[in-house]
Amino acid sequence: MSRSITVIGGGIIGASIAWHLTAAGAKVRLVCETPGGIATPNSFAWINASWGNPHDYFKLRMRAIAEWSRLKGEVPELPLSFKGGICWDMPESDLLAYAENHAAWGYDIKRIEAAEISAREPALAVVPDFALHVPAEGVAEPRMTADLLIADARRRGMELDDNVRVTGLRKDEAGRIISITTDHGEWPVEEVVLAAGAATAALAATIGIDVPVETPPGLLVHSRPVAPMINGLVIAPELHLRQTAEGRLVAGTDFGGMDPGTDPDGAAAELFAKVKAFVKNGESLEMEFHTIGYRPTPEDGFPIIGRADGVEGLYLAVTHSGITLAPAIGLFAAREILDGEKEALLAPYRLSRFE
Ligand SMILES: Cc1cc2nc3c(=O)[nH]c(=O)nc-3n(C[C@H](O)[C@H](O)[C@H](O)COP(=O)(O)OP(=O)(O)OC[C@H]3O[C@@H](n4cnc5c(N)ncnc54)[C@H](O)[C@@H]3O)c2cc1C
């Protein structure tokens, strides 16, 4: 008999885990308030294994980049674009050290000069003397990707209960998960994957599990759609920029977005003015809207993925960089849940490291 698993959360992480469990033959019920997610639609959505991370995390991110291609083969409608990233968002010496270090780790990264930057991104009004080019970096349009994974999983037999607010988890005296409480009543469960983004901590706390997650805000501005002008990802100092599939320029001061402070409208206007100055004919651009997303970020900045010690039948998945990591987390979680396999790449990311 196939295993019956309840996934809580319909953002990119819950959607990917539910898709992989369903594709592997499990009987899956996805329960969420908002299909498509909360942080997910407000994400910059840069898929990368870029600077600033230790080697273990680099390896997980590299694997995730490769897993996006595999998943695209299985769900061809996925809105992915791997047109590469051009990066110069740090002082020259740090940029060169990053290139040297990551090239030694196997990242396909190379220095390009101003002429090549302009050839790759002709719309830029501001071009540095040199930058780094990483052809393997890309984007998954985040909301559409989560929605498509849910839709495809449903075609494969997954059950979806949306507009349902989960209020808590319940376990029996032996420490086994037995039900979830919702605003539609109490539902018995066999196994639960808790992938509720920023709400993971509050829900885990209802059965005494401490999941240390912070939720820093991130502001992004979106232009009205314009004809194609930016080809890939542009990672400049205090301005990270890309163009969406619908033609909107989307930008933040960094890929995580900046803290909007007490005047989000003012901060958005200031950021959009930078976008206008950064591209040729930028004065004709109009801002359509801005978003403030709350990044589900474990206390030490790294993912929390895996079974929760002391509670049987509960698997946790909460992370920043969820757009980059989603296909790998989905695949690994499904294998760990269904086959009892322990994925070596996830070893540093268990909840037990906080004990
Ligand atoms: C501004 C910004 C920029 C970012 N940039 C990048 C980037 O460039 N690259 C990258 O890889 N990552 C980036 N991220 C991070 C990435 O977006 C997140 O890691 C990812 O979206 C998390 O997905 P999730 O599914 O865990 O959470 P969410 O998308 O928040 O989904 C949570 C789900 O849980 C459900 N839920 C929550 N509570 C309950 C409840 N009580 N009952 C029922 N359902 C519930 C919600 O309805 C929703 O379906 C960025 C994030 C932000 C905000």
Image: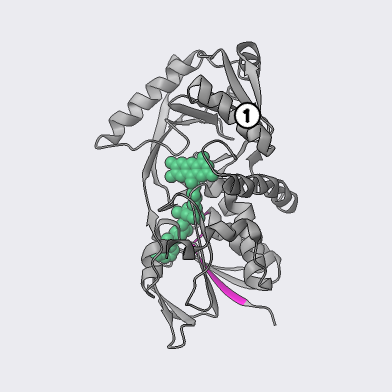
Residue that sits furthest to the bottom in the current view: 173
Image side of residue 346 versus residue 210, left or right: right
Q: Horizontal and vertical percent for residue 81? A: 65, 37
Badge 1 crowding class, 10 Å Cα cut-off, few under 14, some 14 to 19, many 20 or more, is some
Q: Pointer 1: what residue?
A: 100
Image side of residue 250 versus residue 117, left or right: left
Image side of residue 60 versus residue 263, left or right: right
Residue at image coords 42%, 65%:
355
In the displayed structure, 49 sits above or below 133; it is: below
- What main secondary structure does the magenta stretch of the protein show? strand
Q: Amino acid at mark 1?
A: Glu
Q: Horizontal and vertical percent for residue 51? A: 54, 35
Q: Where are the magenta residues, as a range?
A: 4-11
Q: Horizontal and vertical percent for residue 192? A: 52, 73
Residue at image coords 57%, 27%:
97
Task: Note whether residue 308 is visible.
Answer: yes
Q: Horizontal and vertical percent for residue 282? A: 47, 16
